[in-house]
Amino acid sequence: MMARFLPILAVAAALVLPLATSNTYFHHLLVLWMLYSLLALSLNIIVGYIGELSFGHAAFFGIGAYTAAILGMNFGFPGFPGLLMAGIVAGAFGFVIGYVALRIEGPQFVILTLGFGSIIFTTTNYWVDLTRGPMGISNIAPLGVGAGFELSSALDYYYLSLLLVVAFAYACHALMLSRTGRAFIAVRENAQLAASLGVDVFRTKLLAFVVATAVAGVAGAIFAHYLTVITPEVMSLNYMVAILIMVIVGGRGTIAGPILGALIYVGLLELLRATGALRMVIFAALLTVSVIFLPGGLVSLWRRFADRSTVRTARQAQVEAGE
Amino acid sequence: MRLQSILAATTAAFIAAGTMAVQAQEEPVRIAAIAPLSGPGAFDGQLAVEGMEAMVAIVNENGGVLDGRMLELVTYDDKGSPEEGVSAAKRAIEQDDVDVIVGGWFSSVALTMKEVTRDRILTIMTTSQHPDTTREGHDWLFRLNATSTMMSGAYSQFICDRMDLESIAFITINDDYGRLEVENYEKLLSECGIEVLGNEYYNKDDADFTTALTKLRAANPDAIYVSAINTAQGATIYRQIRQVGYRGTTIASAGNMNPKLVELSGPALEGVYSVSLFAPDSQDPELLAWVAKYEEMFDNEPSFIGSIGAQSIEVLAEAIDAAGTVRDYGELAETIRGNEWDTLLGNVTFDDIGQAEQNIYLIQIQDGKIASVN
Amino acid sequence: MEMELVLLTQQIMNGLVNGMTYVLIATGLTLVFGVLHIINFAHGEFYMLGAFFTFFAAKLLGLDYISAGIVATLGVAVLGILANRFFFWPLRKEHEFTVLLSSLGLALLLTNGGELIFGADPKYVASPFADGIVPLGPVIVTQQRMLIFAVGALVLVLLYLFIQKTRMGKMMRATAQNPEGAALTGVDIRRVYTVTFMVACGLAALAGALVGPTAMIFPTVGTWAVLKGFIVVVLGGLGSIPGALIGGLILGVVEALAGGYISMGFAQAIGFSIIIVVLLWRPNGLFGAARRA
C-alpha cells in the first residue's frame, strides 16, 4: 500500500518544497535538480531499459539547447514551440544515430555513441556561422508565448521542469506496465529469446533511443532558456559523466533512482562546497563507496526495506527479476 | 518515506548553510573571486587568486577600508566554463550576498557572467581580452586588461617596425579570444607587408601539437605567432616548435607570459618577445610591496595574472574609501570612472564603458627571466 | 613534389610515434578487458601517475630520467595491485555498469586527489633526450620520440612472450576464455586479477613516463589518455593485443594526416569517423575475431 502512495507524496513534497524559503539560489539549485532529473530519466531509458551504455547522451542535450537558442536568435521563434522543435531535432538525430549504432552492442556501442557525440561536439565548436562556435550563444530569451507571458524566475522554471519530470516519470511507469515496456525488459534480458517470441528487437531499441534523445533535447532547451547561455561545453565528457553518475548512483532501471541521483549530485556538490579543495575528492570517494556497497543504487536501500516489511508487488518482482 | 526525509534533510541543510553564511559575516567587505580553480585553467586561476590574497593582506594590514572594515575574499570555482561561471555568480549574489565580484579571467566566462551581474552588482573583469566584455557599456562593469584590439595595435606596430619579418604563421586556440587574435593580426600584419602563410587552430584539450607545427614549419614562415592562454599548452607548444625542427622566430601572444611558462619552456622561450601590462623589473614601490608579500605567502613566483588580481583589489579598496560606500554601486562606479588610480602596475583610468587605460610594455625573455625592453 | 613527399613522410612518422603511445596505453586496457572483462575508466589515471611519479622520483630522489621512469613504473604497478584489491576484486560478481562506475569513481578520486597532492601547476618531466634531434634523411625525429617507439616495441614483444610462455600467462589466457572453468582446473583467479592489474597499470605508467618529456603534465591528462586508449581498443578488437598495436598505429597516423592535411581541430572527430566506419564494417573491431589475449 505504501508503495502506491509514495509517488503522490513525493510529488506533493516537490510542489511545496520551494515555498520553504524565498532564497533564490536555493530555487536555482532546485531547477538544476529537476533539469538533471529529466536528463537522467531519459538516459535511464537507454541504460536501464535497453541495457546499453550511451556516451553520446550529452550531445543530444546540447542539440536541444542549440536548437532552441538558434531558433530564438535567428528566426525569433517563440519559446514553447521551440521546446517542441528541440525535442524533434534531437529525436531526429537520435533516430539517425540510433539507426546506425544500435546494431552494435556492449563496449562497441559505448565507443560508437562516444564517437558520434564527439563529432557533434566538434561540428558545434567549428561551425561558427551557425553556432557561434566556442563562444557559444548568450542572451537567450526567456521562455514565453509571444510578448505577454514569459517565465522569468527560477520558480517558474522549477515548476515547468517538475511538470515535465512528473509527466515523463509517469509515462515511463505506464510504459513499463504495457506490452511495449515488457518488450523492453525482454530485449534487455535476452534479446534472442525476445526475438523468438516475436518482439522486433531493433525497432524496440530504436524507439526507446529516439524517445530518450528527444526528451534530452527538451531538457537542453529549457536549460538554455533558463541559463540564457549555451556553449559547446554542455556536450563535453564532464556532463556525460555527471548524468551517468546520477543514473547509476540513484539506481538504473527504476524511476525514483535517476531523480534521487540528480538530487544527490546537485545537493552533495553544493554541500561540499565548504570543503574547498577537498570538494571533488570527497565527492569521488563517496561516489566510489556508494557504488561498492550499494551496487544497485540508492533505491536498492528502499527495496531492501520494502522486502522486509511488505509483500512484494508484481512490479518489484519484475524489477528484481531484471537484476 | 525515505525519499521525503532525504528531501527534508537536504532542504534543512541548504537553509542552515545559507543563514550561517549570511549571519557570520557582517563586518568585512566581501569580494567574490570567481576563477578557474579546477580543470585545465586551474593553475592560472590559482595564480590569480594568490595575487588577490596578497593584496588583500596588504590592504588589511593598513587598516582595511571605510574606517576599519577588513576585506575578505570568497572564492568560487568557474572551472573555466561559462555555465559554471553563471552558477558561481548566481551563488555569490543570491546565496552569499557578496559586496562586489572580481572575475572574468577567460573571455568566454566574462561574456556570459556579465549578463548575470548586470545591474545587480559591481563587477570587475580581469584578464579577459575580448572587446565585447565591455563593448555595450554596462553601468557597474569594469575591465582591467587591455582588449585584444588594443594589445594587437601596440604589438603589431612593434612586430612590423622592429622584427624584420617577411612572412608569419599562427597557431591559435580555438575560442573567442583566439579567433579574434588571428583576425586582428592577419589584418594588421598584412597591412605592413608581412605575408600570412597559415593558421592552425587547436582545441583546449589538445596535448600534442607536432602535426600542426610540422605543417606550419613546411610553409617556412619567418616567424610563428603562438596564441595560448593556458600555461601547460603554451609551454608544450614552445618546446614542440623546437622539436619539429623550426629554427625561425617565435612570437608569444600578448598578455600571456608568466614565470612558470618561462621555467617550463626552457630554452625554447629564450629571446622570445611578448607584451604585457606587467613590467617585471618595474621599481614601483607598490609593486615591490606586493611582490614581497606574495613571496612571503606563496610558493609561486608573482605573475602578470596575479598582478591583475592584485590591481582589482587595489582599485576597489581605494575607490570604496573615496566613495565612502560599497553597496551604493552607482556612487562607487561613478568614483571609479571619475578618478585616476595609482596601482602596482602604474596609473590607470577608466573610460565611459568601464574599459581601463593603462601602460602596455614590450617584454622579452632574457637569460630565463622576463625583462622589459624599450 | 619532393617537398610534398618529405612532408607526408614526416607526418606519417609523427603519427606512428603518437600511435605508439596510444598502443602502450591501450595494451593495458585491452589486457584488463580481455582477461577480466572489466572496462577500467581509471586506466588513464595510472598513465598520469606514471608521469608524475617520474617527475617526483627525479626531483625528490635525485634520480636520472631513466631510473626515475623505472621506479615510477614499478611504483604504479604496485598501486595497480591496491586498486584491484579495493575497487575491482570486491565487485567481480557485480553488473558491468557497476564496475564501470566504480572505476569512474576511482578515476575522479585519482584526478582530484592528484590535483590536491601534486598541485595544479603544470610540470615538465626533464629528459636528456627531449630536444635532441635525429635526422633520418630530410625527416626529423627527436631522440625522445625514437625512445618511445623503441621501448614500446620492446615491451610488446616481452608482453607477448610473457603471455605465451609463462605459467601465469597461461592462467591468464585460461581465465580469459572461461573464468569458472579456469577456477575449477585450479587457476588462482585472485592471483590472475592481481597480476593482470599490476601489468596493465605498469604499462600505463610506462607510457606516462615516456610521453612526459614531450608535453607538460597536469593532473587531468589521464582523461585524454583513457579516451584514446578506448578508441584504440575498440578499433583493434576488445581483448586483442595485436589489435591494440595495429589500432593504435592506425589511429596515430590517421590523426596526423587529418591534422596535417585538413585541420588539427578536426583530427579527433576524423579519427572517430574512421572508427565508426570500421565498427559498422566489423562490429568486433579489426582483430575482434582473433583469439583473446
Image (cartoon, coloured by chain):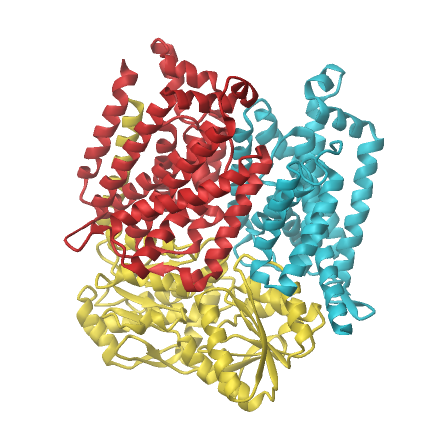
Chain colours: A red, B yellow, C cyan
Does C173 appear above or below B346? above
Picture quadrant of residue A311: top left
- Please give the count of numbered marks on the rendered protein: 0
Along the viewing direction, whichever of C280 and B373 lies nearer the viewer: C280
Tell me, yes or no, if residue C78 can be seen here. Answer: no
Does B300 appear above or below C175? below
Along the viewing direction, whichever of B248 and B90 lies nearer the viewer: B248
**Residue at 57%, 85% in the rendered image:** B194
Does B172 appear above or below A19? below
Q: Position of residue C100 (x, y in %)?
A: 55, 34
Q: Position of residue C159 (x, y in %)?
A: 79, 39
Residue lying furthest left in this view? A148
Picture quadrant of residue B312: bottom left
Q: Position of residue C116 (x, y in %)?
A: 51, 49
Q: Position of residue B71 (x, y in %)?
A: 29, 62
Where does the N terminus of chain B fall, quadrant-wise? top left
| A43 left or right, relative to C23 | left
| C286 left or right, relative to A265 | right
**Residue at 76%, 69% in the rendered image:** C6
Residue lying furthest top in this view? A311
**Residue at 70%, 33% in the rendered image:** C196
Picture quadrant of residue B369: bottom right
Tell me, yes or no, if residue B98 can be seen here. Answer: yes
